Amino acid sequence: MNKQKTSIKSLEIKSLSKSYKRGSVKANRDISASFNPNEIVAIIGHNGAGKTTLLNQIIGIAKPDQGDITFEGQSFIDNTKLARNLVSMMPQFHAPLAGVTLRQSISSVLLIRGISGDQNKRYVNAILNDLKIEQWADRSGDKLSGGLQRLASFAMAVVCPPPIILLDEPTNDVDPVRRKLVWSYMKKLAKKGHIVIVVTHNLLEVEQYADRFLLFDHGQLIKDEATGEQNRPFALNTLTVILNDWNDVSNLPKAMDTQYLEDDLQVVITLSAEQVPVAIDWVLALISERKIVNYKLTSASLEVSYGGLTDGNEK
Amino acid sequence: METKNNVILHHGGDGVLFNLKKLWGLIRWSLIRHKYLLPTFSIVQAAFALAIVYGLALLIPDESQTTAMYLSSGAISLGIIAVGCVLAPQIVSTAKQEGITKYQRTLPVTRSALLFADIAIWCVASLPGVFMGCLAAILRFDITLDITLLSFLIIVIAQLTMICIGFAIAYAFPPNVMALVTQLIMLGGLLFSPITYPIDRLPEWTTYIYQSMPFVPITNLLRSTLFNYGLFSLIDLVVAILWAILGFSLSLFALSRRE
């Protein structure tokens, strides 16, 4: 497990455990982690891995059976009011938007955070502009598309945000252009010194934008690592080959794993660093024989690592 | 609140004004969310009040002063019960199912502020019913109302009591049980409770039950203050307040309970 630098401004999770249904369902098992300012941390894992439960525990909706959550030396478990003042959360499902326009929703959350008058209007206009959603500002939330509702929810969580921001699947249903805007906004918040914690299933975005990821599996934290780390013990390479004819698959190179996607005429080969040269020779030979439509060699993505570390089953 | 580059630096300075501002934020948000519901409820309550004052009077052959007073005060009382113990729990229960309550629990406000905001909304929501009940009483029976500070306070206490009970029902029970309980209250209130007729028409043993439940005491209080008919009972007031406290406490407990 990665040893993270911690500071007095870090959010500390210590030995957190939580079970439901009289202990029969373990939501979290002995989770420990630090979340630092200036950092986007992605929480990944299959459905029911305990990601949302962790967020709910941080903001004080769920109570852990054991363990503690502290920020600046104060326990969020003992003082949930403090937690709510220092944390804002974008829920997995949409915030209450029915009958309220996007502008009114954001403005109301600001007012609830104690910001009124011109400052309130300024902040509302700024976030609408940053997320490029001004044209829907005066439309009722229930008449917005799923993606825009997510953006509204995101805006409500990050407009004049407190030090800790929890976002549960913020880019689901959001169009590719605004996904980038959402991540850029998170980057901006992290740069300003906020702790940004994002639950997501989009591993490509995690690799591209997050500073660190925590991988959960059946309530356990099984990986806590920087996304840019090159020397992962499970670092692999993926060779994807698209063939002209399925019968041309022969003399495959030695590999860690080979998947045959016959319907797509694809072979996906997982290689260790030592196996790459032989595999390239094999590909070059097929190219010279005009048996390949296309091919792609990439360093192992988080997706491959993720698949290797979790069984993907929900409990 | 102190902010630097949009990062909130200080959160502790929760003065009264600051908290009132936050409470107003909650109330305003709820008002916007319920902007279509409130006028609808007003129309329903107006129809309800007219139905009791004009409709129930048709069932009674002699229109004595007692009948007029009981029907008039009963119309107001049942209107308040309908809003507090039927409509409010249904809306709160829906909010609970749709995750609105859960979302509100993540906001930087106290649990009691969440309750106060909703209570304020529902007090406003039940006012048209009170107004229409009064108007119907004046038009139908030519009753002179005794509008004083005390009668106004009693109306507010009656609203608070019913709304707090309604909230407790919504927060404590799953939706199907909530629906059953609210229907029972309304059926009991309309058909069996001595709200629209004197209690002495019922067997004596039922008196103890009705006096310990909140519905008859608040009606008695409304009748004795707003209609200046019958004696003002301190015991009725205590019963109503105790039920309000119980309802509020149960709701607060349910809202504060962590998963």
Image (spheres, coloured by chain):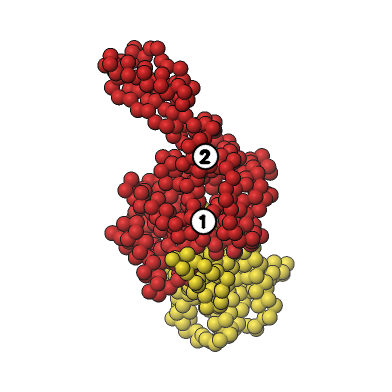
Q: Position of residue B176 (x, y in %)?
A: 56, 51
**Residue at the image point whose x is 65% and y is 50% from the top:** A14
The shade of chain B is yellow
- Disc 1 designates what residue? A37
Q: Position of residue A194 (x, y in %)?
A: 49, 58
Q: Chain of mark 1?
A: A
The shade of chain A is red
Please tell me which residue lies in front, A199 or B120.
A199
Please tell me which residue lies in front, B65 or B251.
B251
Q: Secondary structure at mark 1?
A: loop
Residue B94 vertical position relative to residue A52 in the rendered view, above or below = below
- Disc 2 designates what residue? A45
Asked if residue A174 shows in the view, the reply is: yes
Question: Which amino acid lies under the numbered mark 1 shown in the image of this protein?
Answer: Pro
**Residue at the image point whose x is 34% and y is 65% from the top:** A125
Please give the label number shown on residue B27. Answer: none
Apparent side of residue A182 relative to residue A195 in the rendered image (left or right) = left
